[in-house]
């Protein structure tokens, strides 16, 4: 971990040249923790905004470019099953993270590495669950536009996971071994 110095002489911990974890500033004889403004995106705030925009687009986009001539009930049944499975995986992943849960790719300052439960099989079950639910939503809607958005969501979540893994590796040296043993998003697949 590199160390840097602010203009006022306060120290800050840096994971990489563009990622500031936090800065300690002495104020009135006591130390305080101050975070950089969210719009600077130093903890990954822009990743969360992009994720929200994609999920909102999927929810609000009209059905367009019908992608099948098969009976709609088949696609709705399959899509509904994937939505429930994906949301179940994402929800369980969130519960298993406990106090480590954050929408940001930056690990919590007092967080710890979770490698049990779903995390014994996949490094990012919440992201994987959102991707599965997104594909399910596209099938439910029977819309080629939603399928394109689901692919965009999968690519985006994969990129966010890669960013998060860089930060986790800098924070937890044992993450490298964990990363070699488990899939990124979907157990046994990817």
Image: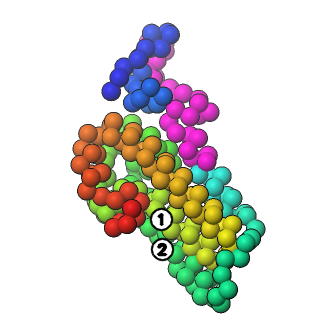
Which residue is tagged 2?
Answer: 85
Marked residue nearer the N-terminal end (2 or 1): 2
| Residue 39 seen in render | yes
Residue at 55% across / 44% down in the picture?
A: 47
- Asked whether 41 or 11 is in front, the reply is 41
Q: Residues within 10 Å of mark 1 (few under 14, many from 20)?
A: many
- Asked whether 141 or 104 is in front, the reply is 141
Q: CA distance from mark 2 to mark 1?
A: 7 Å
Residue at 52% across / 39% down in the picture?
A: 44
- Is residue 44 part of the magenta span, yes or no? yes
Whether residue 62 sits left or right of residue 32 in the image: it is: right
Q: Which residues are magenta?
A: 22-50
The answer to whether the residues at label 2 and label 1 have Cβ atoms under 8 Å apart is yes
In the figure, 68 relative to 104: above or below? below
- Asked whether 85 or 18 is in front, the reply is 18
Secondary structure beneath disc 2?
helix
Image quarter for residue 137?
A: bottom right
Residue at 61% across / 48% down in the picture?
A: 50
- Is residue 21 part of the magenta span, yes or no? no
| Residue 26 seen in render | no
Residue 150 percent coordinates (x, y): 59, 63
Residue at 59% across / 57% down in the picture?
A: 152
Q: Give the number of the disc on residue 129.
A: 1
Quadrant occupied by the C terminus: bottom left
């Amino acid at each position: 971990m590199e160390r840097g110095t602010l203009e006022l002489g306060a120290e800050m911990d840096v994971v990489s040249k563009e990622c500031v974890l936090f800065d300690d500033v002495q104020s009135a004889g006591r130390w305080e923790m101050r975070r950089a403004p969210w719009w600077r995106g130093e903890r990954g705030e822009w990743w969360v905004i992009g994720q929200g925009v994609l999920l909102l687009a999927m929810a609000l986009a009209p059905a367009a470019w019908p992608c099948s001539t098969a009976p709609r009930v088949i696609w709705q049944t399959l899509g509904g099953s994937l939505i429930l499975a994906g949301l179940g995986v994402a929800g369980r992943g969130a519960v298993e993270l406990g106090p480590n849960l954050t929408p940001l790719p930056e690990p919590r300052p007092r967080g710890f590495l979770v490698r049990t439960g779903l995390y014994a099989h996949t490094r990012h079950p919440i992201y994987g669950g959102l991707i599965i639910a997104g594909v399910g939503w596209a099938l439910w809607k029977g819309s080629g536009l939603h399928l394109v958005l689901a692919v965009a969501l999968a690519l985006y979540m994969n990129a966010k996971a890669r960013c998060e893994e860089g930060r986790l590796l800098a924070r937890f040296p044992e993450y490298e071994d964990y990363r070699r043993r488990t899939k990124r998003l979907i157990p046994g697949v990817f």
